[in-house]
Image: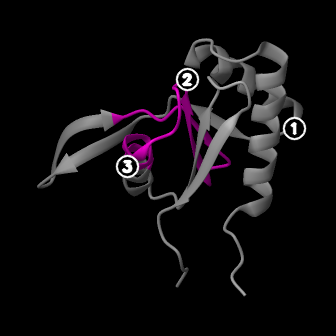
Amino acid sequence: MTQLLEKELVYKIVGCAMNVHSGVGPGLREKTYERGLYIEFDLENLEFNQQAEFAVHYRGKKIDEFIPDLIVKNKVVVEIKTVESINDEHRGQLLNYLRITGIEVGLILNFKPAKLEWERLVLKTARK
C-alpha cells in the first residue's frame, strides 16, 4: 500500500483554500486569494513562505529566477490560478517549479470556478 506524500498537509491547505474561496467568492485576482491564504495559514499555524526566490541555472550559470506563489512548511509548492480550468500548461509549470525547488509535492489551486478546483502533483512517485 502506497502512502500519499504530505497527505495531511495537502488536506489542510485545500481546506484553507476552500475557506478563502467561499469567503471571498470566485473569479477575483490571484493576489486576492494569495492574501486570503496568508490569513488562513496563520489561523491554522501553517508555516509558509511567500514569493521566495529560486535561481534557475544552465551550465552552471544563473539564467533566471523562479518565484513560487507560496511554499508551505518547505514541503508543498502552492500555485494559485484564476483560469477557466487547470490544464497541462499549468501542470507542466508546477512540475518545473518542483524540480527547481527540490520539493516533491505541489498544489494548483484554481479560484475562478464556482467550486474551488485543485490538483495535487508529485514529482517523484517513490522515496528512496
Which residue is at 57% across, 13% downward?
29
Query: Which callout, 1 or 3, points at the residue further toward the start of the chain?
Result: 1
In the image, which disc is placed on residue 3?
none
Task: Decide: is 120 above or below 125.
Answer: above
In the image, which disc is placed on residue 92?
3
Nearest-to-viewer mark from 2 and 1: 2
Which residue is at 51% across, 28% downward?
51
Which residue is at 38% across, 57% downward?
99
Residue type (three-letter) at the residue carrying disc 3: Gly
Image coordinates for residue 33, horizontal then vertical, percent:
67, 20
Few, some or many C-alpha atoms within 10 Å of disc 3 (few <14, some 14-19, many ≥20)?
A: few
Between marks 2 and 1, how big is the CA–CA gap? Answer: 24 Å
When asked about the image quadrant of residue 63, the answer is: top left
Task: Decide: is 58 above or below 6.
Answer: above
Tell me, yes or no, whether the highlighted magenta stretch contains residue 68.
yes
In the image, which disc is placed on residue 82?
2
When asked about the image quadrant of residue 13, the answer is: top right
Image coordinates for residue 35, horizontal then vertical, percent:
68, 18
Element marked by disc 3:
helix
In the image, which disc is placed on residue 44?
1
| Quarter of the rendering occupied by the N terminus | bottom right
Residue type (three-letter) at the residue carrying disc 1: Glu
Few, some or many C-alpha atoms within 10 Å of disc 1 (few <14, some 14-19, many ≥20)?
A: few
Element marked by disc 2:
loop
Tell me, yes or no, whether the highlighted magenta stretch contains residue 79.
yes
Residue nearer the viewer, 10 or 101: 10
Which residue is at 40% across, 47% downward?
88
Q: Which residues are magenta?
A: 66-94
Element marked by disc 1:
loop
Q: Is residue 46 visible?
A: no
When asked about the image quadrant of residue 60, the answer is: bottom left
